[in-house]
Image (tube, rainbow, N blue to C red):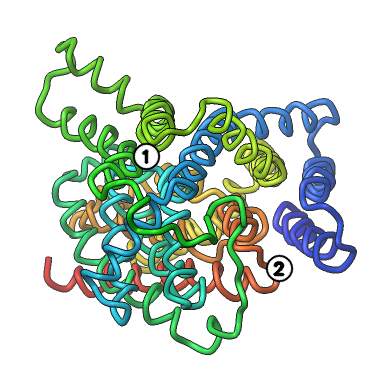
Amino acid sequence: MPLVTVILGIILLFILIAKFKLNAFIAFIIVALFVGIAGGMDLNTVVDSIQKGIGNTLGFLVLILGLGAMLGKLVADSGAAQQITSKLIEKFGKKNIQWAVVLTGFIVGIPMFYSVGFVILIPLVFTVAVSTGMPLLYVGLPMLASLSVTHGYLPPHPAPTVIADQFNADIGKTLLYGIIIAIPAIIAAGPLLARTKLITRINATPLKEFYNPTIINEDKLPGMGVSIFTALLPVILIGVATLANHFLSEENYLLTLINFIGNPVIAMLIAVLTAIYTLGVARGKKMTEVMNSLSASVSSITMVLLIIAGAGALKQIMVDSGVSTYIADLIKGSNLSPLFLAWFIATIIRVCVGSATVAGLTTAGIVGSLAQIDGVNAELMVLAIGSGSLMLSHVNDSGFWLFKEYFNLSVKETLKSWTVMETTVGVMGLIGVLILNFFL
């Protein structure tokens, strides 16, 4: 039975990593083989599926994380992160620093993929925590909650955008309703959760390669304008491309050029090249010194990439073996509220498959007919699915491992922090959808 196979696979993954301390990448490959073979897949097909999952995952992330690591290292070592941090603290005050990172995460998160926003902002989070003496998760969770909510709820992110198109939902209304629902979800999963004993007892430490523990004298820091421009250049480029798609026709050659520059990979590359000059060469550093810094930054994320690749392999096995479709079919005939049913199916698939995007798109294909029923709000269906797709993130989600490795946490600590944060976002999203449904 596919459901039993998945449950056994997830249990095996926990045991291998938590009990036997096996390297997470190796554990993922073992479990992917187990789930595929136990699920009745042909042996060669299992191997092909694992390779496909790793390739699809790394094809995008290896570029984003690699370039992001380079940009983060330059921003940290040059003192740009310290400059931005000091101004944030000055404007918001140490007492309100959580709201500063919430706002930053939300602004950055709207036009950006989660992983891109993560690697851009994480050096700033590390520097804020070190500079203020505050617990790392107290500062980090609010930013991550903002990024997660925008990724799952709001266009122009892939899943919400594609689902809205499938349901003939209005993108503008989806974005508006999504922001209304997002605000309380971010507050609950970010600043409020970060202040609870569950989180404050966890001692997270920054991945040392992505922050500069040395406090640089103010007169040697890069200017505030240069610091912000360089650190957020990918956000600017991607944001411009997003806006251009709403105002320029598809036949316009300028739009093609803007979309190319606004592609996350190209935007990150341009940002790194800019940072090499503005935060390196222009400030008197030798090119060899800058290149050595970049090499150190990339070598530090090798295992992070492998672990995320392993999660991608398991995700692909889940998809190719038909597990997500099987589970969805079990509850498809229910008489529950269409909004709740969409959220619940997305939650189940998210738990089994790991990827929020896969969970969202798979659910959309299953409940598409429900969105056409009279009285069902298509925009809220998009948001219900988005909320469910963020629920209960655990060891088969690449985001889980990204968070764990960058914050130097154990699996148990990551479950207590990251998983609880993601689940809070998912539950608050459902509540917001159901409340908003009364008024629409």
Residue drawn at x 56%, y 68% as measured from the top left: 419
Quarter of the image with the N terminus in it: bottom right
Residue occupied by mark 1: 158
Residue occupied by mark 2: 410
Mark number for residue 412? Answer: none
Q: Which of 310 and 4 is in front in this view?
A: 310
Local secondary structure at mark 1: helix
Which residue lies most toward the bottom here? 197
Instruction: Calculate the distance from the C-alpha at mark 1 to the C-alpha at mark 2.
Output: 30 Å
Which residue lies most toward the right here? 20
Residue drawn at x 48%, y 66% as measured from the top left: 422
In terms of image quadrants, where is residue 203?
bottom right
Give the x, y percent position of residue 378.
23, 52
Residue drawn at x 40%, y 67% as measured from the top left: 335
Looking at numbered disc 2 in the image, what kind of residue is underneath it? Ser
Q: Is residue 402 above or below residue 57?
A: below
